[in-house]
Amino acid sequence: MAARVASADETRACEHATMQSGISSAELMTRAGRAAAAIIADKFASSLSDGALIFAGPGNNGGDAWVVAESLAQSGNSVRVIEVGTPKSQEAIDARTSALATSGVRIVETRSSERLVIDGLLGTGATGNPRGAISDAIDSINALGKSGADVVSLDIPSGVDASTGEHDRCVIANETITFGVVKRGQLIARGACGEITAVDIGLLDDADFRSLPLLVDSQWVHHRIPPIPPSAHKGTRKHLAIVGGGKGMAGAAILAGEGALRSGIGLLRIVCDPSSVVSVHAGIPAALVSTWPQTAEHLSSVIDPADCIAIGPGLGNSPATRDLVERVLLAWTGPAVLDADALNVFAGDTPSLAQLLAGRAAILTPHPAELGRLLGIATQDVVQNRFEVASEFARTINAVVIVKGSPTVIFGPRGERLVVASGTAALATGGSGDVLTGMTATLLAQLREGENRALEAAACAAWIHGRAAELCHYVRGVTLADVLDALPRAWNEEPPIKQKGILAALEAHK
């Protein structure tokens, strides 16, 4: 079961709706704590052999920690708890009382020989910088982590804002076990979370819950990637035309073409500025190469055979670019992917772009600055509102919009939202988006027609793009050539796959 992504307010709303349906807060706490204990016992068995040291805060996150303490002790483990504040809610008080009545659980002041530390200080509802005893406890946990202990955070690392990911002083965890939904802040502050495992605590699966963004995982992606049958030929693998490669920018078109070829396109044509023809021929010999069309007949000859058009990589932002994009989109009414300057030339004039895209499956792939120009807002506003910013835009333009970043959020024209959290900072380099454009256009060409065609092509390509970066294992020293070399493995892995930093599939609660 794939996970949903929620803010702190949305998480509380889901929990409230579940409790309104008849499941108590105490039951949710018990489910969360027992599920976390089961995962800890499985993943950290070696460290747990020396016992567990649990930091329990005064809120319901502390109550979760007391349930974990009881569950681990019932399995025969030694559990020592450092209390940081008195439990406030009745559920947390009851969880503490029950845990302390269990053999093997005791309250202590300092660490003994434990190699496993569990953070139950602050939960989803906490905001602002930690202070006082909580701040001191965070420092203690991090010191233990630096000395070699495994650190597991319950729901979210204490000190990380569950909605924004903002943090000053926070726990740096090796593992975060999150309850019911993945928190937005976890996907933004992944460096503090370590590996993230979401567990199912039985939140009410109602319309509001299903309206939350879906976190795309390996199973979701590989279920949708179209197979290439043994009888395939270049025609059945489809024909893609990439329009780009302006003067001095042949590399962008080459990278887009490489992304397409590494994603299984059957026939590739690159349509570029005359000055880029030699470079493109040399850089990607498998491609057919044409110059930017000057006449209607020339335009027809280069785009009519295509199953999809990708336009934008290395075009340059000028009136001539706007004219070229308009001529291509007026002459070609099939599926299209628009990136970079094919979007920049419509800054402040998105109605014209919507009119050009009407009636086709279309995907836009802006990074935050490009989307900001289209919407007339600051780049920082795009970043801070990444989970909502393009919802209305996707509806009005009737296209899928990939808002690239960490995480990437994909918006559909019918209000769909998908989140892709795969990837590393190896993708934070010039040309990475061009590779994604070629990959996205390949899938858009190959997927069967249907209302979800563009949405699925965008999400699958973005996830595989990130997964290829993860398979490079490093950031410094990795180039886009390494990412391209990793694409065959990324496309052909067998799910389920634990991607670097997050396991999207929900574990069943115990």
Image: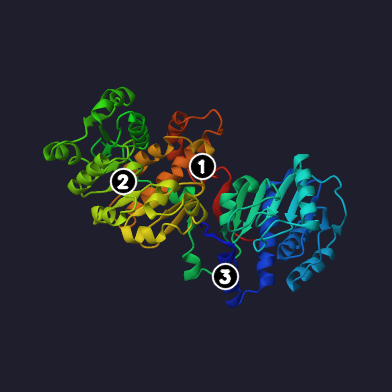
Going by the numbered disc 2, the residue's amino acid type is: Val
Going by the numbered disc 1, the residue's amino acid type is: Gly
- In the image, which disc is placed on residue 13? 3
- In the image, which disc is placed on residue 202? none
Within 10 angstroms of label 2, few (less than 14), some, or many (20 or more) residues? Answer: many
Q: Residue at x 82, y 57 (%)?
A: 81
Helix, strand, or loop for circle 2? loop
Query: Which of marks 3 and 2 precedes in the sequence?
Result: 3
- In the image, which disc is placed on residue 423? 1
Viewer-nearest of discs 1 and 2? 2
Q: CA distance from mark 3 to mark 1?
A: 30 Å
Within 10 angstroms of label 3, few (less than 14), some, or many (20 or more) residues? Answer: some
| Residue under numbered circle 2 | 345
Residue 419 locus on image (x, y percent): 48, 53
Q: CA distance from mark 2 to mark 3?
A: 41 Å
Can residue 216 be seen at all in this image of the molecule? no
Query: Relative to residue 283, is residue 30 drawn left or right?
Result: right
Q: Nearer the viewer, residue 14 or 400?
A: 400
Q: Residue at x 56, y 61 (%)?
A: 7
Query: Which of marks 1 and 3 precedes in the sequence?
Result: 3
**Quadrant (top left, top right, bottom left, bottom right) of the C terminus:** bottom right
Going by the numbered disc 3, the residue's amino acid type is: Ala
Query: Relative to residue 279, is residue 379 drawn left or right?
Result: right
Helix, strand, or loop for circle 1? loop
Query: Relative to residue 60, is residue 249 drawn left or right?
Result: left
Q: Are marks 2 and 3 in contact (CB under 8 Å)?
A: no
